[in-house]
Amino acid sequence: MPSRFASPRREATATATATTVPRPTPRPTPRHFQGEGYRIEESIGYLMKLAMAGLRRELDGRMAQHALTGVQMLPLLLIGCGECRTAAELARLNDSDAGATTRLLDRLQAKGLLQRRRSAADRRVQELELTPAGQDLAAQIPHVIAESLNHALRDFRADEVDSLRAMLRRIIANVEPGS
């Protein structure tokens, strides 16, 4: 009898194993790139890096009027929309180390855009909260991002943007841990 705490996935696996249902053969990984004759200018990763660097410069230029960089705007956006409440959550979302995240938050706090408060549930944790000035700026950020993306994608058709988004999501799914 299965435990009432057993996961549905584990139970399904146990049932499938008990009835000897054949597992599908995994597809071989396509070899889109070879080490021999590798050209960095044809690398998808390198091209994505160049695209991100260009978007970052574009965002930096547009955020300069707000005395912020593109890197500084992301925490305001993430905190403002409720995606993170602590420095540790922000570091995970940004794929950044704790020290760099702390320095970034220090700069935003010095600008009067956010404040840190001790958590009532756990005094060791500092929760992040936007100030009224930070909330006002966070509300403008999606518009700045939209302008930058529209500039970068200005000669793309709508179906091409949808395809690009879908392909990027597939790449993200393929590089997720355990995939």
Image (spheres, rainbow, N blue to C red):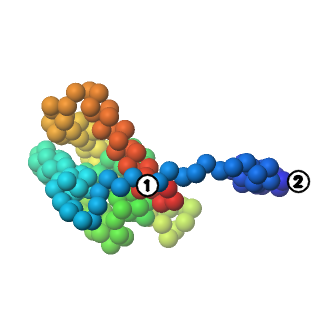
> Which residue type does callout 1 highlight?
Thr
Q: CA distance from mark 2 to mark 1?
A: 39 Å
Q: Is residue 177 above or below residue 62?
A: below
- Which residue of the protein is positioned furthest toward the bottom in this rendering? 99
Task: Name, please, the residue furthest toward the top.
Answer: 158
Q: Is residue 75 left or right of residue 24?
A: left
Q: Residues within 10 Å of mark 1 (few under 14, many from 20)?
A: few
Question: Residue at the spot x=34%, y=65% of the render?
Answer: 96
Examine the rendering and report whether any part of residue 119 can be seen. Answer: yes
Q: Which residue is mark 1?
A: 29
The reply, left or right, for residue 85 in relation to residue 51 is: right
Mark 2 Cα shell of 10 Å, populated few (<14), some (14-19), many (≥20): few
- Work out whether residue 68 can be spotted: no
Question: Residue visible at 35% across and 41% down?
Answer: 167
Number of numbered tags placed on the structure image: 2
Determine whether label 2 and label 1 are within 8 Å by CB: no
Q: Is residue 75 left or right of residue 15?
A: left
First in sequence, mark 2 or 1: give its number.
2
Residue position for label 2:
1
Q: Amino acid at mark 2?
A: Met
